[in-house]
Amino acid sequence: MSSVAELAVDFAGLQFRNPLVAASGTCGWGEELERLEGFANGLVGAIILKSATREPRLGNPTPRIVEAAGGAGLINSIGLENPGVDAVVRDYLPRLADAPTVVVGNVAGSTVDDYAATAERLCASPVIQAIEVNISCPNVKRGGILFGVDPDAAATVVAAVRAVTDKPVIAKLTPNVTDIAPIARACIQAGANALSVSNTFRALAIDVRTHRPLIGANFGGLSGPAIKPLALLKVHETYAVARAAGVPILGGGGIMTGADALEFLLAGATACFVGTLLLREAAACGRLLDELAALLAAQGTCRVADLVGGLILHE
């Protein structure tokens, strides 16, 4: 694993020792990563904890995860299973007090008040250095639509979280929209310090024997290599808005190699989250860093930050 200084990035005022971030839901509450050799030496630039909600959630019915055909990714519908924010703060965050990386909380909810109350509780802990706002959850008070597909609704949630903390707020955008730019702009105007692009793509898998969905909740979110070209485009489509506002992007979707991570950087991401790969190869970030460092050396680039937004479109 490489730990050279040129891999460090500044992300919304937070100092990541490298641009790789363990995505929410892939490292639990951090305890899984603690067992990995190299974690203390900068295996990841940051970790994003599982989503916490105001009250405990049991999650969706099983099966919750199905592998996509050809190993192209995973369809999951976990349903935000978690013990509730009070238990997270009491039982899990103290274990991360000496974490050798940046710890980012993640909040979800059914109402705007849920988001605000959960974020305030999490951010009161000194362990949490930033908060990711998952605006891909059903908005119960608005007939079940997703907060993230409506610019006004997304802005309302982000503003509510912004009002309860002075820590960096990262708006996690959904890709399941025709045009992501207006939603990104609305979140920035509401106080988001960074954008996460993007969440999973809505998907369906069918059991041809029973004629029923393979996922217990019927539909799920597709992640993994199959979505990488789509996620790259979403990052590129968001970059102009983010750059104009001086806001960084945390980009990802299907990263399996250092070259994949470099593609996201070129598309406009300042840092890259790794998700599905960590479920298959828990220590993958060490390999990715070596591969990324080799690419930098081969291209004669001294700092990974110099490559952000470096995509050159054909005339």
Image: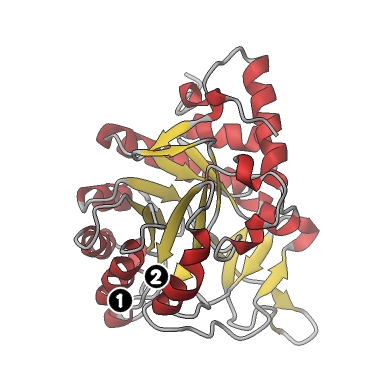
Residue at the (63%, 15%) spot, across then down: 299
Vertical arrangement, residue 6 with respect to residue 254, above or below: above
Vertical arrangement, residue 233 with respect to residue 65, above or below: above
Amino acid beneath label 2 = Ala
Looking at the image, do the residues carrying marks 2 and 1 touch, with CB atoms under 8 Å apart? yes
Q: Which mark is residue 199?
A: none
Q: Is residue 137 left or right of residue 117?
A: right
Question: Which of 216 and 291 lies nearest the eye of the viewer?
Answer: 291
- The residue carrying mark 1 is 114
Q: Position of residue 306 (x, y in %)?
A: 47, 21
Q: Quick one: SS at disc 2? A: loop
- The residue carrying mark 2 is 108
Vertical arrangement, residue 281 with respect to residue 154, above or below: above
Q: Position of residue 291 (x, y in %)?
A: 70, 31
Q: Earlier in the sequence, mark 2 or mark 1?
A: 2
Can you say which quadrant of the picture contains the N terminus? top right
Residue at the (72%, 84%) spot, across then down: 211
